[in-house]
Amino acid sequence: MSRESRKFKVPDALANVYDFANTLDLRHFTHFGVEHPQSDELAGPKELADWMVERGLGGDGGRVTPAMFETALRLREALRAYLQCDPAERRRNRDVLGALDRALAPFPLRVEVRAGRGATLSAAREDALAGLSAVAIELHDAALVGTLDRLKMCASEECRRVFFDRSKPATRRWCMSTLCGNRMKTRAYRERQREAK
């Protein structure tokens, strides 16, 4: 779990999905006169390996190759496309579901039965990308208990940050109503005022 996921009270059971999706920062807005710089924490294989080690997902499976890096980026892209959909749309958007299914295929899981813990899922991969199987496991587990629907992408085109919706009805659209929500509402209000003239 990262400092960021702790700060925004993302459940531990979804922290790797949240952190992985947010390694790509597409925010491009100005706040208090300061423009937010876009960034990508996963600039290359080394950065991906470092990111996994920081989160306890790194293993002794060797180094991350360029092909593995591309596999990880495909997973992130498909995951972000999935989270961008409204939770109700996620279950019926065949393109998004198919892309995520294909991106998860390189991360097979196995069931392990352990005394005192029951059945758990673990990575079947044994290479440097095995740690990313945690994302697949968290997706599976969160879908079963229903918390995956609370992981969403901010509706602001200038943000696109993934957030965990802690509201009781689970209807939040923005990562921060005081920032993205306020900016979008103000823009919509100004647009309505222009059209009314």
Image (spheres, rainbow, N blue to C red):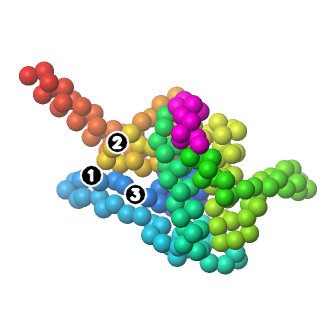
> What residue appears at the point 70 percent right and 39 percent down from the top-left corner?
144
Residue 190, quarter of the rendered image: top left
Residue 134, quarter of the rendered image: bottom right
| C-alpha separation, residue under disc 3 versus residue under disc 1 | 12 Å
Q: Amino acid at mark 1?
A: Phe
Identify the element where label 1 is drawn: loop
Which disc, if any, is residue 29? 1
Query: Looking at the image, which is closer to me, 119 or 62?
Result: 62
Q: Which residue is mark 3?
A: 25
Circles 3, 2 touching at the beta carbon (< 8 Å):
no
Q: Amino acid at mark 2?
A: Ser
Identify the element where label 3 is drawn: strand
Would you say residue 170 is visible in this rendering? no
Q: Position of residue 86 (x, y in %)?
A: 49, 34
Would you say residue 45 is visible in this rendering? yes
Mark 2 or mark 3, which is nearer the start of the sequence?
Answer: 3
- Whether residue 107 sits left or right of residue 87 in the image: it is right
Identify the element where label 2 is drawn: loop
Q: Which residue is mark 2?
A: 156
Circles 1, 2 touching at the beta carbon (< 8 Å):
yes
Question: Which of the image's four quarters has the N terminus?
Answer: bottom right
Circles 3, 1 touching at the beta carbon (< 8 Å):
no
Label 2 Cα neighbours within 10 Å, binned few <14 / some 14-19 / many ≥20: some
Label 1 Cα neighbours within 10 Å, binned few <14 / some 14-19 / many ≥20: some
> Magenta stretch: residue 169 in it?
no
Q: Position of residue 31 (x, y in %)?
A: 25, 53
| C-alpha separation, residue under disc 1 versus residue under disc 2 | 10 Å
> What residue appears at the point 29 percent right and 54 percent down from the top-left corner?
28
Farthest residue toward the left? 197
